[in-house]
Image: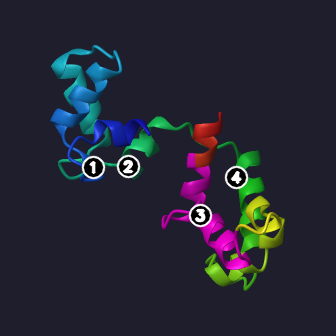
Amino acid sequence: MTFRIMDDDGSKSLDFQEFEKGLENYGVSVGKDKAQQSFAVMDKDGTINFDEFLEKLRPSMSSARKQVINQAFRKFDKTGDGVVTIEDLQGVYNSKHHPKYKSGEWTEEQAFRSFLENFDSGPFLANLTGIQASSD
């Protein structure tokens, strides 16, 4: 949410001006030099995208956490091909347990599509580390 608020032009990336303004808006007064140094740590091409932003802000995962995530990945990856597809997820998610399906408000397909909206197109491990960072 913070990233989207800082992204004034909606480009899904932050230039230095947006980054600096965002720091100020969140009460982080570090001065222009320190802001530029911080921006440079995250920046790879003149702007910071969400993945670069999150990568530098979230803590690294413990080996125990990685092991749990790898187990979850293997459970989701029904075909064992190293990629979690929609078909794989259909094999592990039961739409009939969704409250809106139970109430008759949604079909199984609608409940499943709602479930899919929770996933990003990025790599599975990066998504789950992002979940860890937001839940810590």
Which mark identifies residue 50?
Answer: 2
Q: Main secondary structure of the magenta part?
A: helix
Residue of label 1? 13
User: Image height check: is 19 above or below 13?
Assistant: above
Give the crowd class for mark 2: few <14, some 14-19, many >=20 residues within 10 Å.
some
**Which badge, 3 or 1, comes first in the chain's sequence?**
1
Residue 71 x/y as whole percent: 78, 63
What range of the chain is rendered magenta? 106-130
Residue 108 x/y as whole percent: 73, 77
Element under disc 4: helix
User: Image height check: is 11 above or below 22?
Assistant: below
**Which badge, 1 or 2, comes first in the chain's sequence?**
1
Give the crowd class for mark 1: few <14, some 14-19, many >=20 residues within 10 Å.
many
Element under disc 1: strand
CA separation, marks 3 and 1? 21 Å
CB under 8 Å between discs 3 and 2: no
**Which badge, 3 or 2, comes first in the chain's sequence?**
2
- Name the residue rendered at 30%, 21% in the picture: 25
Q: Does residue 94 appear in the picture of this structure?
A: no
CB under 8 Å between discs 1 and 2: yes
Three-letter code for the amino acid on which mark 2 is drawn: Phe
To which quarter of the image does residue 24 belong?
A: top left
